[in-house]
Image (tube, rainbow, N blue to C red):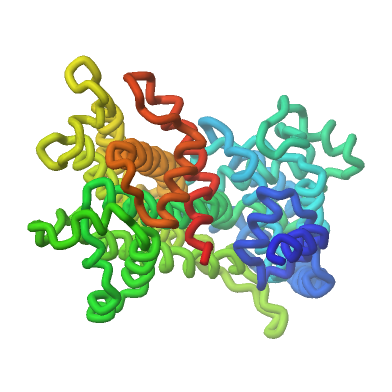
Amino acid sequence: MGNRKSAIRMARTLLLNGRNLTRGDFADVVLGGRRVGLHPDARRAMLASRRIVERMIREKRVVYAVTTGVGSLSTEHIDPAQARQLQLNVVRSHCCGVGEPLTIPETRGLLLLRANTLAAGLSGIRPLVAELLCAMLNHRLHPLVPSRGSVGASGDLAPLAHVALTLIGEGEVTVDADLRKRARPQPAAAALKRAGLQPLSLQAKEGISLVNGTQAMLSLGLLALAQAVALADTADVAGALSLDALRGSPVAFDERLQRARPHPGQIESARNLERLNRGSTIRESHRGCGRVQDAYSLRCMPQVHGAVRDALAFARRTLEIEMNSATDNPLVFTNEGEVLSGGNFHGEPVATALDVIAIALTQLGGISERRTDRMVNPLTSDLPPFLAGAPGIESGLMLAQVTAAALASENKILAHPASVDSIPTSGNKEDYVSMGMASALKLKQVVANTASILAIELLAATHALDRLAPLRTGTLAEKARLIVRRAAQPLSEDRPHAPDITRVTEQVLRGDYQALLSEG
């Protein structure tokens, strides 16, 4: 039934109005190629705000970035006759990005989110601008957007400018039938022409409206959030396997303990852990043994994993609000007929949320690495040293744990929040900036590292459980063990582990282990 609903949703064009874009919609468009368009209500709202901008130009009112320069040049007044040239100059001059380009999903997210915020009708620009962004998505024309160059001050100026450049027929795009692989870059003008699309001739206010906003950091953040949720679920699965591999006790997951400290994430993780190991014959084999309490990396999984879940819930709320926010400057309010200049473009809310996710995932990877160490370390388990078949002549998973340790340590460095940093820009007018794009780029690496750390734990736990046969882990956890086995054969002798780690990491990021928790 769920798949049928998803197919029906994907078949329908998503109509943007700037108010009700969801994370599911985002995934459908960005990853699935769902078509998008402008809602009729959005067209009406955009036309109404456009009329106010045009009236103010006729009346020679002072409007930031319309009849003034931008940034610290806002004191320079611009003749209305030069308004169009100003917008063109803003786009061209702000294209200063460097570094590797954003991926196709990141770029598609940027296009979608920018179209949606403009569809709110608070920017004072023509519907044609948002419609061209939608058309580029539908034709799979993806601008080459350098990933670095934004301080998250007036939003992501440089990345957004590189998008705007392609809308006016300059810069480069790729035309990607396969959303997983970029094609060869080509001039935007030629690609637009082949798609039957006309490049924009920017009007007053339209250049600044295209480059002001948080959509680059937000696009990366939404993609990272979806993966982070999968990692949190996977950590419960991996932890359940490790618990049995180390002959740990599920008593610490008793719901009465969680209700005495009712953090939502803690309760959810404890329920997952208890359910995953239900029916374990390993547990029954050591019930009543002399061990009273397990190490924290086992006993405190609900508390640590749960704190990660609660942090992700905070970040999710923040990013969902940002998805449907107007982050342009100035904003046009049609009911009052006013144009107000403010700071909705500032990336601090998003930057903070992304830093929180990075910190949370660093905790998740840290405790996972400790569980892996306990399984391979002859000082902390009753398992063969490093899970080797013939310890001494074989090293088993000795270096796999070293890799997990290296990644966990790298995460600690990357977890330093970018959002607490700032450097003045634009002649000190932008004197406190968010560094939100730095938060997003760091988080991207933290996600990748944590996925590999969890993959190593899953491998270690599965190999450890082999040593306990014929005893079996819980019914649901056993399904997880078999998923690992699809990617990695039993460890009969030393072999290169990198291919196994890569394949299991792909399973983790694909959500294979996350899906287990939806089973009854």
**Quarter in which the N terminus is drawn:** bottom right
Residue nearest the observer in this picture, 140 or 159: 140
Query: Which x, y percent locates residue 209?
Result: 66, 57
Q: Quadrant of residue 408?
A: top left
**What residue is rendered at 40% in x and 25% in y?**
498
Q: Is residue 212 visible?
A: yes
Q: Residue furthest right?
A: 196
Q: Is residue 348 above or below residue 45?
A: above
> What is the count of numbered marks?
0
Query: Which x, y percent locates residue 157?
Result: 56, 48
**What residue is rendered at 80% in x and 49% in y?**
138
**What residue is rendered at 58% in x and 43% in y?**
159
**What residue is rendered at 45% in x and 25% in y?**
499
Q: Quadrant of residue 54?
A: bottom right
Q: Residue furthest top?
A: 393
Residue nearest the observer in this picture, 416 or 368: 368
With 128 as the anchor, is 417 left or right in this view? left
Q: Residue furthest left?
A: 290
Q: Is residue 154 visible?
A: no
Q: Is residue 210 above or below residue 255?
A: above
Q: Residue furthest front?
A: 470
Query: Which x, y percent locates residue 318?
Result: 47, 67
With 298 as the anchor, is 100 left or right in this view? right
Query: Which x, y percent locates residue 421?
Result: 32, 51
With 361 as the anchor, is 209 left or right in this view? right
Residue nearest the observer in this picture, 37 or 85: 37
